[in-house]
Structures are given as C-alpha cells and as structure tokens.
Amino acid sequence: AQSVTQLDSQVPVFEEAPVELRCNYSSSVSVYLFWYVQYPNQGLQLLLKYLSGSTLVKGINGFEAEFNKSQTSFHLRKPSVHISDTAEYFCAVSDGASKIIFGSGTRLSIRP
Amino acid sequence: NAGVTQTPKFRVLKTGQSMTLLCAQDMNHEYMYWYRQDPGMGLRLIHYSVGEGTTAKGEVPDGYNVSRLKKQNFLLGLESAAPSQTSVYFCASSYEGPYNEQFFGPGTRLTVL
C-alpha cells in the first residue's frame, strides 16, 4: 500500500525568502511522484512530476523538487517566493496502476 | 477547449435527499476520477473509471454511486445524502494512467443539512 505524509500543515514565509515543503512517501513498488498546487477557490493543477531519470525535477513558476529514494522523500523548493505563490500544495504518489494518493496538503502563506 | 467542467458549482441538500453531480471533459481522456476534499485531509478518491462503461471503487466509496455511459461524462450520485457528505467534490481526468497529469474541474461545494 502507498501513503504520503506532508509534514507541515502550514508554512508561513516572508516574500523573497526561500521555502521548502516536505513530503515523504511509502510504497513497496516503483513510484511516480507529483506536486499539485491549489489556488483559492480553484481546482488543483500540476506543478511538477517525477517519473524516472534525473532526481531533480523542475516545474512551473520556479519550483523544483528532488526525489530521494533512500529517504523516500520528494521535497518541493523555491529559492524566492512571491505573494502569488500563496496557495495549498499537495504531494501525491502513484504506482502507475490505476490511482494516485494525495497527501493532506501544506498551506503556504507569504508575508510581505 | 473547456477542459473539465462540473455541474452544479454549489448545492444545499437536506438529509435523505438525492442528487447527481455531473463531470464533463472535452480532452478525450480515458481516465476519470471523483474526489472529495475535506479540511486537513487532502483529496480522497471516491470512485474512478478507466474507460467508457467501467467504474471502480476508491478509498471512500460508501454512500456514492457512479456511472460512465459516455467517455466524456462521469456522474457521481448520492442516493440518500448525509451530513458527513458535506464536502467539496472535484472531478479530474487524465489521458492514460495516473502517472499522467490529472486535469481538475473547479469543484462543487455541497452542504447537507
């Protein structure tokens, strides 16, 4: 069985500061990993995904994530955040069979 | 392209009433999903479909039924609504399996009194 743990439910940061949103997963098989973003009152949209290959994945809006198999982690990072990055971020894992499991979400709030 | 659309956007039901949520996609996607989103719990999969005429249970299927009579539509039904079904419901679709990007609708906010 797969599971996803997002270690922080809320992360407050100042504008232009770096941020890291943490995600750990468990799976007995090879995994595909995702980060989705949900802006207020909207559906989710894909930020980035890891399927195979390079462990450093770059996504939209300057975000990147690193797949670490030994630590079963897929943390999301951005070197300098903007007010427009205020949103909820979801880590997700799939074994590629039929469905995807989402984490409980991390709410990123940016202070001016 | 409209992408994924959901009808209605908001609904208030009384306990015991029934309703159907409609999801439509115009991207010719094979896979479609229904999720519910509750505070602090992320998204939980209710039912999904891997093609026209097929459906399968997700994590939290009890109290819901689904149908996929046409490839572009995925219906979620509540036969006898309960307050525990108060939630925001999202539909999503993907081209192939879940290793592909899922495209989400805008959501339906359902309140059961």
Image (spheres, helix red, strand yellow):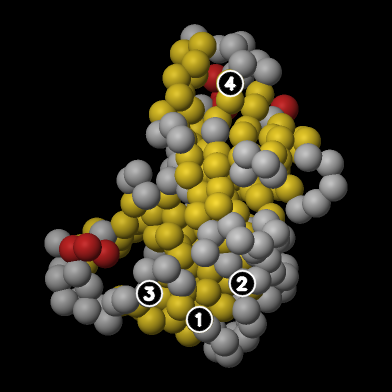
Query: Which chain letter matches label 1?
Result: B
**CA–CA distance in space, label 1 to label 3:** 9 Å
Question: At 48% across and 28% down in the image, what residue appears?
Answer: A108
Task: Classify mark 3: helix, strand or loop.
Answer: loop
Decide: is A64 above or below B31: above
Q: Quadrant of residue A54?
A: top right
User: What amino acid type is highlighted by mark number 3?
Assistant: Pro
Q: Quadrant of residue A67?
A: top right
**CA–CA distance in space, label 2 to label 3:** 16 Å
Q: Are marks 1 and 3 in contact (CB under 8 Å)?
A: no
**CA–CA distance in space, label 2 to label 1:** 10 Å
Q: Is residue B20 visible?
A: no
Task: Classify mark 2: helix, strand or loop.
Answer: loop
Residue B69 is tagged as none
Q: Are marks 1 and 3 on the same chain?
A: yes
* Furthest-front residue in this view: A70
Of residues A64 and B71, which is closer to you in this image? A64
Q: Please indicate whether residue B35 sits to the left or right of residue A100 in the image.
A: left
Q: Are marks 2 and 1 in contact (CB under 8 Å)?
A: yes
Query: Where is residue A59 shown, x and y percent of the image?
Result: 74, 37
**CA–CA distance in space, label 1 to label 4:** 38 Å
Task: State the residue position of label 4.
Answer: A19
Residue B56 is tagged as 1
User: What amino acid type is highlighted by mark number 2?
Assistant: Ser
Task: Classify mark 4: helix, strand or loop.
Answer: strand
Q: Quadrant of residue B53?
A: bottom right
